[in-house]
Amino acid sequence: MSFVRINIAVKPNAEVIDEAIKLSAEINQNSEAFFVLDGENFLPHCTLYSPEFPEEHLDHIFIEVSHIVQQTTPFMAIADKSLSSHVGYVDVAIEKSPEWISLHETVVKTLNPLRDNHLRDKYKQPNELAKYSKEQQENIQSYGYAEVFNDFRPHLTLNRLKDV
């Protein structure tokens, strides 16, 4: 069986995309990065859920995501004015509003059964799992992804730096 990682994410509006690309380029001026947002190969986005799924479920996943999108009304994303970093990733935090929480929970609860309890290979490695808190390890086992529910942290990633 073949598996594919799918990043279920929210695409920001054009103004936010342009600003994120500029900020990403500025950060890259002083540091070497694994990626820099460019609007083509690396797109600004806010991840909701990002596990691996069996390829045979792709059509069903797209249908479910389409239903969720149709039922979701637009809402504001309020960004924190500071940058944060974790394991080289540089991002802008977004306020964890009821709208973000609801959308995230809907996506995870709807799509998690389509994983068939599959885990990414990296999550099967004890050294990799040790990088996560006990709660995040439980999330990985149950949902195939560390940042779910209480550990969900809405954010827009700008870069991943190499020297960290």
Image (cartoon, helix red, strand yellow):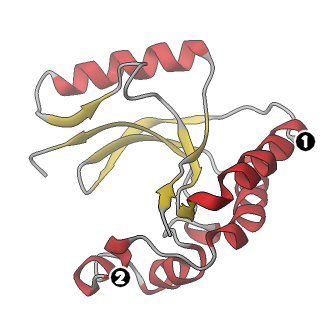
- Residue at 65% in and 52% down: 58
Q: Say if 133 sits above or below 52 in the image.
A: below
Residue 93, how many percent across, how many down?
49, 44
Residue 60, how many percent across, how many down?
76, 54
- Residue at 78% in and 33% down: 75
Task: Pick whichever, 101 or 112, lies toward us.
Answer: 112
Residue 124 circle label? 2
Q: Amino acid at mark 1?
A: Gln
Task: Pick whichever, 134 or 84, lies toward us.
Answer: 134
**Residue projecting furthest to the front:** 1
Estimate the spatial distance between the alpha carbons at disc 1 and disc 2, rounded to whole Å: 35 Å
Residue 71 circle label? 1
**SS state under label 2:** helix
Q: Nearer the viewer, mark 1 or mark 2?
A: 2
Task: Kindly indicate the quadrant of the structure image that contains residue 38.
Answer: top left
Q: Is residue 7 left or right of residue 59?
A: left
Q: Is residue 53 left or right of residue 71?
A: left
- Residue at 80% in and 51% down: 64
Q: Amino acid at mark 2?
A: Lys
Residue 105, how many percent across, how many down?
74, 61
- Residue at 51% in and 44% down: 155
Task: Kindly indicate the quadrant of the structure image that contains residue 120.
Answer: bottom left
Task: Kindly indicate the quadrant of the structure image that contains residue 95.
Answer: top right
Residue 15 circle label? none
Crowding around mark 1 (Cα neighbors within 10 Å: few <14, some 14 to 19, many 20+) is few
Q: Is residue 82 left or right of residue 109?
A: left
Q: Earlier in the sequence, mark 1 or mark 2?
A: 1
Q: Say if 127 sits above or below 114 in the image.
A: below
